[in-house]
Amino acid sequence: AQSVSQHNHHVILSEAASLELGCNYSYGGTVNLFWYVQYPGQHLQLLLKYFSGDPLVKGIKGFEAEFIKSKFSFNLRKPSVQWSDTAEYFCAVFRGATNKLIFGTGTLLAVQP
Amino acid sequence: GAGVSQSPSNKVTEKGKDVELRCDPISGHTALYWYRQSLGQGLEFLIYFQGNSAPDKSGLPSDRFSAERTGGSVSTLTIQRTQQEDSAVYLCASSLGGGQPYGYTFGSGTRLTVV
């Protein structure tokens, strides 16, 4: 079935560690890719997005993601995490044919001070 | 309003009762989406409204679920004969148009608990 997969369900890191969260999708054709973040008790917020052009996308708070078309991947990275990055992170794919965002199951990141 | 407003923020109901969840989108946003967020399941698409077009109901899990959008603005999601597996956070989002995914704004959700 066509889907969005986030293989890391729960990640625990110490402050200053590097972060990489995996995201793979199985849709063919043109897709738009997103990472959303949900801090404890807050709304879902857009972290970054990829539509076209440079496959390395930079978002807010030092996050970046790289679109690798051949691998159907859009992994999220941050060189040095902070305690305030503790949140749940969702990868999402938008297909124009369906006009809706399809989300992965989310990755819960806990950063220990 | 400035954001997407959902009410109630929390709802506890007894199994078998009907519930109505409300979403008030950002003024001028023609597209409105409902998602369900369950532990370990991520965000599950439920239904999508775009202007006056027929809604995309492909994500509704059963015929106990229905939604309407009156006057192209406020939307109500109704769950009839609630079951324990309906317990989740129900999120609403709106955007300027269906083809503009970067414009999704999410509400804070309604946490539904069926006891």
Image: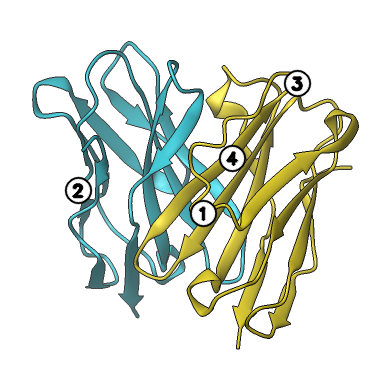
Chain colours: A cyan, B yellow
The chain containing the residue under callout 4 comes to B
Residue type marked 2: Gly
Q: Which residue is mark 3?
A: B51
Residue type marked 4: Ile
Packing grade of label 1 (10 A; few <14, some 14-19, many >=20) is: few
Q: Are marks 2 and 3 in contact (CB under 8 Å)?
A: no
Kindly indicate the quadrant of the structure image that contains residue B2.
Answer: top right
Q: Which residue is mark 2?
A: A22
- Side of B73 relative to B115 (left or right): right
User: Is the same chain shared between marks 1 and 2?
Assistant: no
Point out the frontmost of discs 1 and 4.
1
Point out the frontmost of discs 3 and 1.
1
Tell me the SS state at disc 3.
loop
Point out the frontmost of discs 2 and 3.
3
Point out the frontmost of discs 1 and 2.
1
Q: Which residue is mark 1?
A: B62
As measured in the structure, the alpha-carbon distance from the residue carrying label 1 to the one carrying label 4 is 12 Å
Which comes before the other along the chain, label 1 or label 4? 4
As measured in the structure, the alpha-carbon distance from the residue carrying label 2 to the one carrying label 3 is 35 Å
